[in-house]
Image (spheres, grey):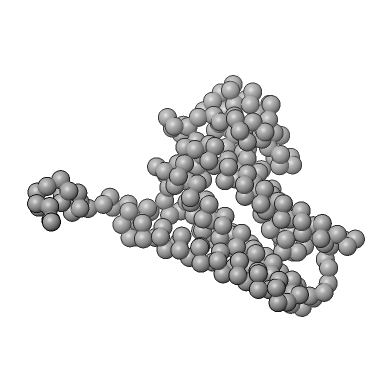
């Protein structure tokens, strides 16, 4: 039985959604669905590729689909944590797929290319010093998974006080979070990404990109923390100054 055309149910069904949610807009539901689907497919194919490579070959090329899988997981979680815990600011850009474009894409393409070339041209050669390849691999896994956990957990704990872009004005919802992970380190989301990024290169076995990622990430977060903390002091005054004295960043020489 259809509702009368003037009933609240019919009017609600005919209501036009906010423009921001229409295709091509910042919060396009179509765009969010497509990106989530593609990331899910990429993760699923990566898992299958890693499993098949390990099961039927002795090739070290399983590392490449593992890297793609970690990227897919990272970008999905960036959007999911924002959508769930800081809903008002969630939009297509929250996936961070085009963040710092094109430098971000170039960095991951370089890492993939280094892994592919070294594993194809020198499949039996170890680049790790003193036969420490297995230790570096395990340490890389630890850094990837713990880094991802720290970043996602930090975003969840901060809620609406976390934003992907540095805020130059203090919002009413912006609170100084000093509990949970924030009681152990300042900027745990930055800590997580820093070690996650370095860890991916250790798993890939990329000596050149390992050095490049470490330098670039350190420079990026060193400058960002310096800029952001000047704003946080302005927002929270002595409360942030005292917090900064008590708690470090756990990223070497950043924010000290």
The residue drawn where x is 77% and y is 56% is 138
Q: Is residue 127 left or right of residue 62?
A: right
Occupied quadrant, residue 129: bottom right
Q: Residue furthest top?
A: 238
Occupied quadrant, residue 50: bottom right
The residue drawn where x is 57% and y is 55% is 74
Quadrant into which the C terminus falls:
top right
Q: Position of residue 181 (x, y in %)?
A: 63, 36
The residue drawn where x is 12% and y is 52% is 3
Counting labels gives 0
Q: Position of residue 122 (x, y in %)?
A: 79, 76
Q: Position of residue 46 (x, y in %)?
A: 60, 67
Q: Is residue 226 left or right of residue 172?
A: right
Quadrant into which the N terminus falls:
bottom left
In the image, residue 156 above or below residue 143: above
**One can see residue 168 in this view:** no
Occupied quadrant, residue 173: top left
Out of 188 and 245, give the one closest to the viewer: 188
Q: Is residue 72 left or right of residue 4?
A: right
The residue drawn where x is 73% and y is 77% is 57
Out of 222 and 14, give the one closest to the viewer: 14
**One can see residue 60 in this view:** yes
In the image, residue 121 above or below residue 231: below
Out of 36 and 207, give the one closest to the viewer: 36
């Amino acid at each position: 039985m259809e509702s009368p055309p003037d009933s609240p149910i019919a009017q609600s069904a005919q209501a036009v959604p906010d423009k921001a949610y229409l295709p091509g807009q910042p919060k396009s539901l179509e765009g969010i669905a497509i990106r989530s689907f593609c990331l899910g497919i990429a993760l699923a194919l990566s898992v299958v590729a890693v499993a098949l490579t390990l099961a039927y070959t002795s090739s070290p090329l399983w590392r490449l689909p593992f890297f793609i899988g970690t990227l897919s997981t990272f970008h999905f979680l960036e959007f999911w944590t924002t959508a769930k815990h800081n809903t008002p600011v969630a939009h297509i850009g929250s996936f961070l797929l085009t963040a710092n474009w094109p430098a971000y894409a170039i960095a991951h393409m370089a890492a993939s290319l280094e892994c592919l070339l070294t594993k194809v041209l020198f499949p039996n050669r170890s680049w790790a010093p003193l036969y420490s390849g297995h230790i570096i691999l395990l340490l890389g896994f630890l850094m990837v998974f713990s880094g991802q956990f720290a970043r996602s957990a930090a975003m969840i704990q901060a809620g609406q006080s976390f934003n992907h872009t540095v805020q130059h004005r203090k919002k009413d919802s912006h609170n100084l979070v000093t509990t949970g992970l924030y009681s152990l380190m300042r900027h745990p989301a930055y800590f997580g990404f820093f070690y996650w990024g370095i860890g991916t290169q250790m798993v890939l076995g990329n000596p050149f990109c390992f050095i490049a990622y470490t330098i670039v990430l350190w420079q990026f977060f060193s400058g960002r923390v310096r800029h952001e903390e000047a704003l946080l002091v302005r927002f929270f005054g002595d409360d942030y100054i005292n917090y900064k004295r008590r708690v470090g960043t756990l990223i070497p020489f950043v924010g000290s």
